[in-house]
Every structure is written in C-alpha cells, then in structure tokens.
C-alpha cells in the first residue's frame, strides 16, 4: 500500500513538473521606421527652441511610420529579428500576442495579420490593449501558457503607430510619441526560470489622465491622444514605486541584486525620478527615450533589444521591467536574461 502511494506521488510530482515548465527569453528583436522627426523640425513648427523641447522630455528625435506602413509591418520586422536571434523556425511558434493601442484593423487582430505575414498556419494569436503597460501584460499571459505546457514557445510583441493618433496641433503629444516595435521569443526551459515573476495591475479611477478621444464604438470624430501630464507623472511615480517594492519583496531581493532596470520610456524626467527614488545607478538603467521617444507598448522590448545589441545586457543578467500607461495600468516583470 505504501509503495503504491509513493508511486502515485512520484507520478503526480513528475506530472506537475512537466506542466510547470520554466520560461526564458531566447530571442529579441526591434524595429524603428526610417522616417525621423527631430526637435529641430518641431522647433520650427511651434516656434520654440530645441533646448526647451529637450528639457521638457529628454527626447531628441522620434521615428514615424510612412503612410503605407502599419502596426503589423513594424511588428513583422521586429519579429523576424527575434525569430532569427532565437534560432528557430517561425512554424514552431505556438502563440502570438501583440500588445498595441493602434491595431491595423478593428478585426481581425493584428496578431493574426502578423501570423499570416510570418506564414504560420496554426497557432494561438490575439491582441491585448493595456496601453504602455501592454508588453508586460502580454509577457505575463504568454508565460502562463508556457508554464502550463499549453504551448512550448510564444512570440510576444509590443508595436505601435502612435503617429496615427497624434493631434497635429498639440505639441505635448507630438513631442513625446513615436512609432516602433519590439519583440521577444519565449521558450519553455526545463532547467531555467527566466521569467521569474510578473505583476500587473490597473486602477480605472485614473482613466481620464491619459486617453484617446474616440474609438470604434464611440465614434466621436478624430481619435487623438489626450493627457494630463502633471497628474500622470504623479501617479506614475506612485505606482511604479509600488510595483518595484512588490517585485523585490516577493522575490527576497534588494535593488543591488538588479543588473539592469528596463523602464517604460515615457520621458526622461520620470526615468530619472524613479532611478533617484530607488538609488539605481543610471549607468545600469537602459535609456532609449532620447532617440526612440515614447512608443507606448513597444518601449520595453525596444529598450531590451537596444541593451542587448549595445552589449550592455548579457546572458545571466537579472533585469527588472517596469511600465505604466493609460487605464490606469502598471506592471513589472523580473527576468533572468
């Protein structure tokens, strides 16, 4: 009887271990459209100095998609690089999640359009919309699918064409936002838990701090990004502090254990404020906002990609992703790269 119980227990443990696979980032990719709008361009349009523009944002330039480039096109370019970096065939991908606020169409999903561009016949494919926190939401969802052995690999993309929803007469949004895409390949790993933990939250009491003025159901005219900058800044600092504290506490870590902070690239002032608040050395914070601008859901994977290709982020490094966005949403992910 004891032998049978021990055998059943062993089978159960083996089953659970097989079901709860570790998840690692095996490939990264990024893409920025070649069309660049500099602060000099904006200074002429709005009759302000380049120095004033930089002092408000920490941004020097932003990349904008051409009229015939769509979010799926940007996602496709970044995905090809991530797939090549992972050394896999696209046909092996079991899931595609795209985090975006600027989908190609109301339907089908941009993820399905990307699936077609990649010539993947069958997989799980869908979009999620959590604004600038979207990539961390997507990363968390895909990780759960792989941990539960529903799929063995996933393509997770943050991609945006925010230039489509910029008010051409609003300097605050035209200064901050740009277009781009970043992608990662997640793969099951029996001996490494690369995605150590993820933490995603929202609080809709603050939905009016950042929103678009129209949509599919609410067709109120032009769809423009609108924000209350000072209040948004305050909430961002509060919520990012909470998610950093939660991540470190749950994993019994201190900030000194983090090799690289990879934050949402909203603007330089928020990044600097968070670094000072926690004592993160700016030399160990990936900062791309100056040349990428705020690409919403694409900022974190683009920053990760940039950190890798610049030789900063190395295999085995402990990374902390943090982001906040409209909703109000925020989140973090602790990752061993």
Image: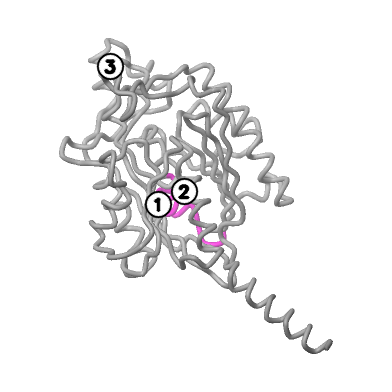
Q: Position of residue 30 (x, y in %)?
A: 34, 49
Q: Residue at x 31, y 11 (%)?
A: 48
Quadrant assignment, res 166: top left
Give the extent of the magenta segment.
303-316
The colour scheme used here is one colour
- The residue at which mark 3 appears reads as 43
> Viewer-proximal residue, 51 or 85?
85
> Contact (CB < 8 A) between labels 2 and 3?
no
Q: Residue furthest left?
A: 68
Mark earlier in primary sequence (1, 2): 1
Q: Please identify, in this view, whether the residue under mark 1 or under mark 3 is nearer the observer.
A: 1
Q: Position of residue 15 (x, y in %)?
A: 63, 75
- The residue at which mark 1 appears reads as 97
Secondary structure under the numbered disc 2 in the rendered image: helix
**Label 1, label 2: how far apart the Cα atoms are:** 6 Å
Sort mark 3 into few (<14), some (14-19) or many (20+) by Cα contacts within 10 Å. Answer: some
> Viewer-proximal residue, 294 or 280?
294
> Viewer-proximal residue, 80 or 271?
80
Judge whether residue 5 is colored magenta.
no
Sort mark 2 into few (<14), some (14-19) or many (20+) by Cα contacts within 10 Å. Answer: many
Mark earlier in primary sequence (1, 3): 3
- The residue at which mark 2 appears reads as 138
Q: Position of residue 75 (x, y in %)?
A: 30, 49
Q: Residue furthest top?
A: 47
- Relative to 183, is 221 above or below? above
**Label 1, label 3: how far apart the Cα atoms are:** 38 Å
Secondary structure under the numbered disc 1 in the rendered image: strand
Secondary structure under the numbered disc 3 in the rendered image: helix
Q: Position of residue 258 (x, y in %)?
A: 62, 49
Q: Residue at x 20, y 41 (%)?
A: 69
Judge left or right: residue 10 versus residue 176. Answer: right
């Amino acid at each position: 009887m004891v032998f049978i119980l021990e055998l059943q227990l062993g089978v159960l443990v083996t089953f659970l271990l097989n079901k709860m696979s570790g998840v690692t980032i095996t490939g990264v990719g990024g893409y920025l459209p070649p069309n660049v709008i500099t602060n000099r361009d904006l200074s002429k349009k709005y009759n302000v100095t380049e120095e004033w523009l930089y002092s408000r944002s920490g941004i020097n330039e932003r990349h904008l998609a051409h009229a015939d480039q769509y979010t799926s096109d940007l996602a496709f370019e970044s995905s090809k690089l991530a797939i090549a970096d992972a050394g896999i065939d696209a046909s092996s991908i079991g899931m595609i999640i795209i985090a975006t606020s600027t989908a190609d169409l109301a339907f089908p999903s941009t993820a399905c359009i990307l699936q077609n561009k990649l010539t993947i016949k069958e997989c799980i494919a869908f979009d999620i919309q959590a604004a600038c926190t979207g990539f961390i939401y997507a990363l968390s969802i895909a990780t759960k699918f792989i941990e539960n052995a529903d799929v063995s690999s996933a393509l997770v993309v943050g991609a945006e064409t925010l230039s489509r929803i910029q008010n051409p007469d609003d300097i605050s949004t035209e200064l901050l936002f740009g277009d781009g895409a970043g992608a990662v390949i997640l793969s099951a790993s029996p001996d490494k838990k690369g995605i150590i933990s993820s933490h995603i939250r929202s609080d809709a009491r603050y939905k009016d701090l950042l929103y678009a003025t129209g949509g599919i159901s609410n067709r109120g005219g032009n769809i423009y990004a609108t924000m209350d900058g000072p209040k948004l800044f305050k909430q961002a600092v509060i919520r990012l502090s909470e998610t950093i504290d939660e991540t470190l506490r749950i994993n019994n870590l201190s900030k000194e254990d983090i090799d690289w902070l990879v934050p949402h690239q909203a603007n330089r002032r928020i990044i600097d404020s968070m670094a000072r608040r926690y004592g993160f050395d700016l030399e160990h914070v990936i900062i791309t906002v100056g040349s990428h601008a705020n690409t919403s859901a694409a900022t974190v994977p683009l920053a990760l990609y940039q950190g890798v290709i610049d030789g900063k982020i190395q295999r085995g490094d402990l990374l902390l992703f943090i982001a906040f966005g409209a909703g109000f949403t925020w989140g973090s992910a602790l990752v061993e790269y």
